[in-house]
Each structure stands twice: as structure tokens, then as C-alpha cells.
Image (cartoon, rainbow, N blue to C red):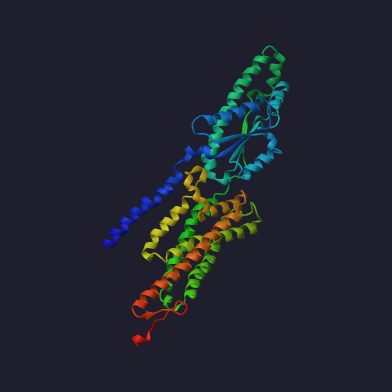
Amino acid sequence: MREVLIIIMMLVVLMWAALPLYWGSLAPGLSHAPNFKTWVVDFDGGPLGAFVAESIINSTKIGNRHLDWEVKPASQFSSIQDVANQVVAEKAWAAVTINPGASSTLYIARAYGDYTYDQTKAVTLYVEQARSENAVGQLIAPIATELLDKTLRDFNARDIAAYIRAIRTHPDAVETSLESPSALAGAWWKTVNLRPWNAAVASPMTIIGQIYLTLFAFIITVTSHRARQKLESLLTYKSLVALRIGLPLAAYIPLSTSYAMLGLFFRAPFDAKFHSGGGFFIYVAYTYMDICALGLVCEAAMSILRPDHMTLFLVSWLVVNISTPIEPPEMQSRWYRYAYGMPFYNHAVAVRTILFDTKNLLGRNAGVLFAWIGLSMIAISFLVWLKHKITAKNDQLRGLAYDVDRPQEVIWSTEHV
């Protein structure tokens, strides 16, 4: 009963120590909207372009429910497609372009009754949903949509009123303008989603699935610990380290491959950036690196924690990781920037690149995962060595001698024979 009470108290402490980290990662929301860099580019140079750019910049002067809008000169870009490419390259989270000839095309369509006029070609909002479906869907797109709606309604109200006053004494002009109702209604805008989040199977592959990978790796850690208990005393230091590192690394191969095949079975879009076969095998490689990074940390922790306390470590390890990839760091408090060095975050970014052709950071992502693998290997080697040293010292005090470079059978000193 006492042990149960102790565990309950430890769980309560862990709950308040770890879970607020996850709650806090989701809390800020709209209050961090000004952290998202966004652009407005006037390719028009006419009344419409000037009005839209001014209105968007003015929105940043009131409250904090606005994005970090910045006016970029059209001369900085070779074309509108260049702006779109910069958004995909993650130079900005979104961009609004007032397209070339937006003002003149509108006025010419009214003057000549051009019924083919498409009012949505005047202004374009570029977003990249696959970069962060939550940030774009819950924050960037709603704020930008509301702003553009209001801006163009205000422009059209003024512009149409001025146009009607100008032609009211010219019946022919009124009749001609009525032939183009879309031009008479005014300019409007459309959204271009450069990288849509169009595969539901990507959700478990980017975030939730990593929890399962951690659990699978944890099971390997606990099971292998029990299996080698009777062997440890018979192994040299080098053999034990090789066993503790090599066995998990070998076990993770079928686990990661089998896990990756679930995405293949449910038709994940592995051909978005690479050839379908190449994309799948790259995903297998990153899944293997991810489970190695997550699992070897558990293996290292097993060296200093009792087996019955490992579940507490597992909860902490999961919470620290799961708090990073759900929302982008811009949407969280500043100290959540530790996400850039965590396995969950880097694996999620790599999967987005493979499945949706977002900005290619595969090299950096692999580097972070390899860093965790390397640190865990060093930690395991050091902790096993330290444990052997402590065991040898304690046994020497009891009249036993151990040699860490020889199998760990007991060698009785001559004075005890």
C-alpha cells in the first residue's frame, strides 16, 4: 500500500511538472499572430494597389490580432511566381500580391463592358498549408481573409460610388458598364494554396505516430533489460555496451520498416517530392533514425533509473517531445524554440518535405536525429562504464576483485582462499 501511495504522489508531481508544458504549447494562439512574417507586394502601381497595401499595413497598428505585414517592393521579385516561390522557401508565411494591371484592367472592363472580366484576378493571397496546417488554417488564413474582405469592400464602396458619379450624366457609359456586372461589382481576391494539406494519412505520420514509435522502442528497452540480466555478469564492458546498443538498433529495423509500410498501405503521397519508390525509402530511413533517437534515450535512462520508474521517464520524454510539432514555434512562447533540437519536431518537418514538397531541410533534420543517437550512445557507454566501476569498487570492499576488461566472473583474492 505504501508503494501505491508513493506512486500516486509521484504521478501528481509529474502531472504538474510535465503536462503544463503541453498545455502551454497550445495556449497562446492568436496573441502570437504578430510573430508570423507576411508580405504585401504591389505589382499594380495603381489606385487599387496603393489602397490595399495601405490598408494592410494600417491593420498592424491596432491591437495584436494581426500578422507581421511588411510591404515588399515589386522590384525585388522577377515575377509573381517568384513571390510564390519565396513563400514555399519559407521566407514568409503568406503573401498578398496586387497583380499587374489590376486597376487598369478593372477600369477598362467597365468602360468597354468586358463581360469576361474576372474580378478575382486583381488580388491574390498565397499560403502554404502543408508547412503547418494548424497555423495556416486556424490563424493565418482567417486573419488574412477577414482583412482582405474588409479592405476590398471598402475600396469597392468608394470606387464604385466615384465611378457612378462620373458616368451618371452619360447614359451610354452606364449602359456599357452594365454589360460587365463583375467589373461593376469591383475588384476581389482569391487564395492560392501552394502546398495543400491534402492527405489525411499524414496526421499520424507526422505527430501522433511518433508516440507509437516511442512506445515500441520503450517496450524493446524494458524487454531487453529483463533478458540480459543473467548475462551482464558474464560480459566484458565492451561486449555489454555492444549488446545494449546493437540489440535495439537491430530491433528497430523491422519495427520502423513495418511502421512505414502502413503509410504505403494507406496511400500516403510519397511521390510529392521524390519518385514514389524513392520517397518511401527515404521515409523508411527517417523513421528508423527517429525510433533510434527516441529509443536509445530510453535505453540510456534505463542505466540510471529503476525499471519500475521508467514509465515516469517515458511520460516526461513524450510530453517534452509532443509539445513541439503540433504548433510552429512562432505560435508558441519563445522558450518553445527548443523544438528545433527535438526528435519529434525534426521528424515531422522531414515527413512534410517528403509528403508535401515543403522546404527541404532533410539534412538538418537528419543531423539533429543523428546527434540524439550519438549522444545516447555516448551516455550508454559512460553509464555502463560508471556502473562497472562502482560495482568493482563495492565488491573490492567486500574482498572481491573485478576487471572491467574481462568477463565479470568473480575472482577471489588469494587472501580469501
Query: Measuring 53% from the left and 41% from the top, which residue is drawn there?
Result: 137
Image position of 209 with respect to 132: above or below: below
Q: Is residue 199 something one can see in this rendering?
A: yes
Query: Measuring 33% from the left and 56% from the top, which residue is drawn there?
Result: 10
Image position of 104 with respect to 4: above or below: above
Q: Is residue 386 left or right of residue 79?
A: left
Image position of 282 with respect to 181: above or below: below
Query: Measuring 42% from the left and 67% from the top, which residue is drawn there?
Result: 303
Q: Is residue 26 left or right of residue 69?
A: left
Please state the horizontal and vertical placement of residue 63, each as a whole percent of the image.
49, 31
Image position of 59 with respect to 215: above or below: above
Q: Is residue 201 something one can see in this rendering?
A: no
Query: Measuring 43% from the left and 45% from the top, which residue is drawn there?
Result: 24
- Taking depth in this image into account, of 323 and 118 the one nearest to the observer is 323
Please state the horizontal and vertical placement of residue 153, each as a whole percent of the image.
58, 25
Please state the horizontal and vertical placement of residue 200, each as a whole percent of the image.
54, 49
In this view, the residue farthest toward the top is 169
Image quarter (top left, top right, bottom left or bottom right) of the C terminus:
bottom left
In this view, the residue farthest toward the right is 112
Q: Is residue 30 left or right of residue 116?
A: left
In this view, the residue farthest toward the bottom is 417
Please state the horizontal and vertical placement of residue 121, each as a whole percent of the image.
66, 32
Image quarter (top left, top right, bottom left or bottom right) of the N terminus:
bottom left
